Amino acid sequence: GYEQLETSGEITALYLDGTAVDQLSAGEKGVVILDNTPFYAESGGQVGDIGQLRSSNSLFDVEGTQKVQATVFGHHGTLTTGTLSVGESITAQVDLQARSATMRNHSATHLMHKALREVLGDHVQQKGSLVDADKTRFDFLHNAPMTNEEIRQVESIVNAEIFANLETQSRVIDIDAAKETGALMLFGEKYGDEVRVLNIGSSCELCGGTHVKRTGDIGLFTIVAEGGIAASVRRVEAVTATNALSYMQDMETTLGGVAGTLKVLPAEVPTRIIGLLNQVKKLEHELSTAKGKLASSQGDDLATQAIDISGIKVLTATLEGADANSLRETMDKLKDKLTSAAIVLAAVNGEKVSIAAGVTKDVIPKFKAGDLVNHVAKQVGGKGGGKPGMAMAGGTDASQLPQALASVQAWVKEKI
């Protein structure tokens, strides 16, 4: 499959559901074995070729090619028309568009591997790869996320090799001679006595895959994703040629849309967003302060609503617009005012409930704030905890809050 994309051959075996058969009929999915084939079988991270097998009265769509044995390839797919029989002569044709795109991505992978070692260091080792017609996915050893600057450096190095339009060279030599060339070998990989050495740009690796004739055939290269998949293993995804162009155009369209919304030039978007984030942060602070003041003013009025139960002031209330911080602040002020008290304050945001419970020091020997807050929280679908004098909880059923707060007085009576 390195030199030809179409050959004539003879069917030597057919398989249906894993069982050898003499014939395949239209509509059946199976595997076709040929005496020779231009198809590349899945290997070394590169997916197998797709294409067609044709005879005078049949058409078999090859959806993937895999090795059955070292030199025996299985063409997996569906017979769309006619019949196929063992011994029949057919024409095997590789899908040129898919093969070309896969070759571009595979060749770009070699250039990217070399660039990653240049930018990040020689510790970079390939840990896995997947190359198909859409993209290249490359896993490698590295202990930190790549920075934007490092990603741009790798892209620049690879594209410089592409624009140089250097010729790709491959040769099959014995393993010892290959080692002397300095060709990059995968750690832990088992190699035979003879290996295929691929030189593409400044990259020199052992590889049995299909590749472009010149680096310029790759067209364009860009990285679209980078992330961690395991301890000290990073994964990069990249695209080439028209896919790279489409990706860049999509990003430009997105940036243009954002710039239009913000009413600035595309180059001014980062500065504008930083300004907006700072503005939001300032407004959030002002809102928090306002909520605190509102809750505090509500707290001043609440102290008079406390009910005396055996010398302990018991107070429950819902504070409008309060958050967890303002609940705590109001609680502290009420405890100071009431001197001997058990207090439960709550706030509702949608269906979510925030609850604060507080007891003064003299009440702690009788019951703790955590016990009180959980008595209320469990009735609104939540739980909480905290210190003996102050505890917080959350809940998910605001409809039960009035009943839960109403039960506090009876609960306190039981405890004292």
Image (cartoon, helix red, strand yellow):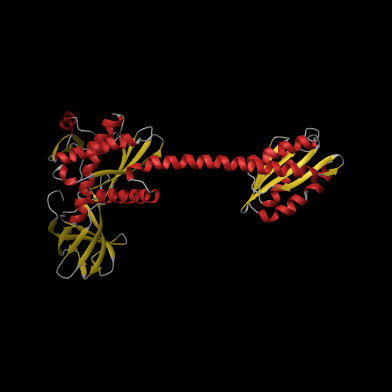
Query: Image point 39% across, 51% down: which residue?
Result: 261
Query: Image point 86% across, 39% down: which residue?
Result: 311
Q: Image quadrant for the C terminus?
A: top right
Occupied quadrant, residue 228 = top left
Occupied quadrant, residue 365 = top right
Camera-side residue: 5 or 100?
100
Furthest-right residue in view? 310
* Percent position of residue 293, x then y: 66, 41
Count every numbered label the image shows and give the total.
Answer: 0
* Percent position of residue 361, x then y: 78, 32
Would residue 278 be visible to someone looking at this image? yes
Question: From the viewer's perspective, is residue 131 above or below residue 84?
Answer: above
Furthest-front residue in view? 263
Camera-side residue: 379 or 83?
379
* Percent position of residue 287, x then y: 58, 43
Q: Does 138 sit left or right of 214 as displayed? A: right
Would residue 384 be visible to someone looking at this image? no
Question: From the viewer's perspective, is residue 259 above or below residue 34?
Answer: above
* Percent position of residue 212, x then y: 16, 46
Q: Does 36 sit left or right of 404 as displayed? A: left
Camera-side residue: 358 or 92?
358
Camera-side residue: 238 or 303?
303
Q: Does 271 sit left or right of 163 as displayed? A: right
